[in-house]
């Protein structure tokens, strides 16, 4: 892991990897989305609205997975002071917030015809909303600080915030078990799935596709931060030479 | 069957969910791509000037 903490080595991998993640991700999302809309049958009870599953579930997993990665990056920054860990955490925040917002919005759109309401303050929805606010707080914390915005590394406070926020991830995961909720219980567990195979396979495609797109966005944002850092460093060096 | 959701407006909810997902994901992809390309161009241009 330490070998790839060097931005030059990282870029040698990230540059060719970005278009592959992007292309393959778009292809899988397109295939899964079309299959979810046209090939699989509607649910016997929920009808056509069950097709929202193919965009809602990947959004939920990536919103939660995004913060888990962000917290790991925060820990790596705190303990090993990897130069890339802080850059990765900052690059994850925006796509993580995007997919959390999409999870809430598509869940709300699904909730109206299914439950008869756009929103309910139950454990799952409220803890997911807290995750959205955590992302917003992290982005404000890192973008509002010039040293972090220009240097890439996270402040100690931002890294600790990322770690403390991770407490919300198991709460989101267990919320439908701990509290009486409008939201259904876990459909996919390590033990299997309660969703019929005929409806399940496009979810694998959209889940893989959106994950690859998430990876592509993170790589693009990391490359942008590294390029900005290099420009800032060169300008500083030029200014020093002129003096 | 009791409790079955039916009616023609079901597809409107599906279209709204898919449309929102496509629009927001495309917006973040596009802005990330454009920002990366601009930043890397600036960085390469500055390196060329130095040579």
Image (cartoon, helix red, strand yellow):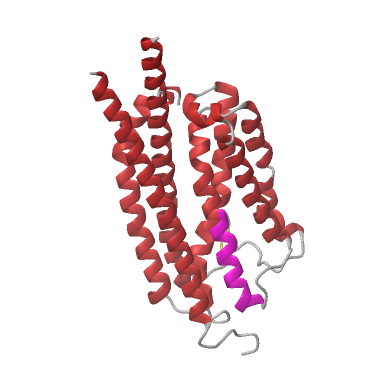
Does residue A243 appear left or right of residue A71 in this picture?
A: left
Does residue A115 appear left or right of residue B28 in this picture?
A: right
Q: Position of residue A39 (x, y in %)?
A: 38, 75
For residue A173, above or below residue A53: above
What residue is at 68 percent from the left and 59 percent from the top? Answer: A124
What residue is at 60 percent from the left and 78 percent from the top? Answer: A113
For residue A177, above or below residue A226: below
> Quarter of the image holding residue A78?
top right
Does residue A123 appear left or right of residue A61 in this picture?
A: right
Which region is colored magenta? A100-115
What residue is at 65 percent from the left and 55 percent from the top? Answer: A128
Q: Is residue A102 magenta?
A: yes
In the displayed orientation, state which residue is furthest to the bottom: B1
Q: Where is residue A7 in the image (x, y as percent from the top left)?
A: 39, 26
Relative depth, front residue between A165 and A139: A139
Q: Position of residue A88 (x, y in %)?
A: 48, 35
Q: Is residue B46 magenta?
A: no
Q: Quarter of the image containing the N terminus of chain A?
A: top left
For residue A131, above or below residue A111: above
Q: Main secondary structure of the magenta part?
A: helix
Q: Where is residue A243 in the image (x, y as percent from the top left)?
A: 40, 9
> Quarter of the image holding residue B39?
top left
For residue B27, above or below residue A161: below
Relative depth, front residue between B22 and A146: A146
What residue is at 49 percent from the left and 72 percent from the top? Answer: B16
């Amino acid at each position: 892991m330490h070998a790839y903490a060097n931005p030059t080595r990282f870029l040698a991998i990230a540059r060719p990897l970005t278009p592959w993640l992007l292309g393959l991700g778009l292809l899988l999302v397109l295939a899964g989305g079309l299959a979810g809309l046209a090939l699989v049958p509607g649910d016997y009870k929920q009808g056509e609205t069950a097709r929202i599953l193919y965009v809602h579930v990947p959004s939920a997993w990536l919103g939660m997975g995004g913060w888990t990665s962000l917290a790991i990056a925060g820990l790596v920054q705190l303990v090993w002071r990897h130069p890339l860990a802080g850059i990765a955490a900052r690059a994850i925040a925006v796509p993580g917030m995007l997919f959390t917002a999409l999870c809430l919005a598509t869940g709300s759109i699904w909730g109206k015809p299914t439950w008869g309401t756009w929103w309910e303050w139950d454990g799952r929805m409220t803890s997911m909303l807290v995750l959205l606010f955590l992302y917003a707080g992290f982005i404000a914390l890192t973008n509002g600080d010039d040293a972090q915005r220009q240097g890439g590394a996270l402040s100690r406070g931002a890294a600790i915030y990322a770690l403390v926020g991770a407490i919300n991830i198991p709460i989101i995961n267990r919320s439908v078990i701990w509290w009486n909720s409008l939201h259904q219980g876990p459909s996919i567990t390590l033990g299997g799935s309660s969703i019929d195979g005929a409806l399940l396979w496009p979810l694998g495609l959209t889940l893989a596709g959106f994950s690859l797109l998430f990876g592509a966005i993170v790589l693009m944002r990391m490359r942008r931060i590294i390029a900005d850092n290099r420009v800032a460093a060169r300008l500083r060096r030029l200014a020093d030479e002129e003096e | 069957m009791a409790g079955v959701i039916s009616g023609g407006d079901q597809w409107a909810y599906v279209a709204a969910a898919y449309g929102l997902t496509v629009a927001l994901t495309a917006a973040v992809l596009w802005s990330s791509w454009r920002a990366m390309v601009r930043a890397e161009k600036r960085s390469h241009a500055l390196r060329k000037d130095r040579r």
